Amino acid sequence: MILDFSGVYRLNSEVIKRCFDIANLLKLIGTEPIITGIRPDLSRMVVQSGFSINSYQIYRNVKEALKAIA
C-alpha cells in the first residue's frame, strides 16, 4: 500500500502517530507500506516525534514507487 504525503506541508505528532499505527498494522497483515512524497522537513518532524522511517520503502513520488514495484 502506498502512503502518499505529496501536498502535505505540516503534520502534528498525533497525525504522525496515526500514520505509523496504520503502517505497522499493514505490516502485521503482510502488506508492505511504501511512503511517497515525504519532504525533508516532514521527515525531520517524524524523527523529532520519535519515529523512524528507516524500515520503510520511500520514494520521491507515486510514479517512482509504481515503477519500483512493477
Image (tube, helix red, strand yellow):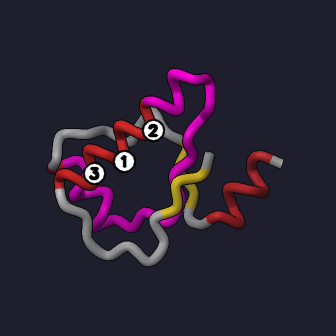
Task: Give the residue at x 51% y 52%.
Answer: 35
Q: CA distance from mark 3 to mark 2?
A: 11 Å
Q: Amino acid at mark 3?
A: Ile
Q: Nearer the viewer, residue 34 or 31?
A: 31
Residue 44: image x %, image y %?
24, 57
Where residue 68 appears, as percent x and y from the top left, is 74, 50
Return the disc, 3 or 2, that comes first in the chain's sequence.
3
The tag on residue 23 is 2
Specify the farthest residue to the right: 70
Marks 1 and 3 sit apart, C-alpha to C-alpha, by 5 Å
Q: CA distance from mark 2 to mark 1?
A: 6 Å
Q: Residues within 10 Å of mark 2 (few under 14, many from 20)?
A: many
In the rendering, at what x and y percent does residue 67 appear? Answer: 78, 56
Q: Which residue is mark 1?
A: 19
Residue stretch in magenta: 25-47
Mark 1 burial class by Cα count in 10 Å: few <14, some 14-19, many 20+: few
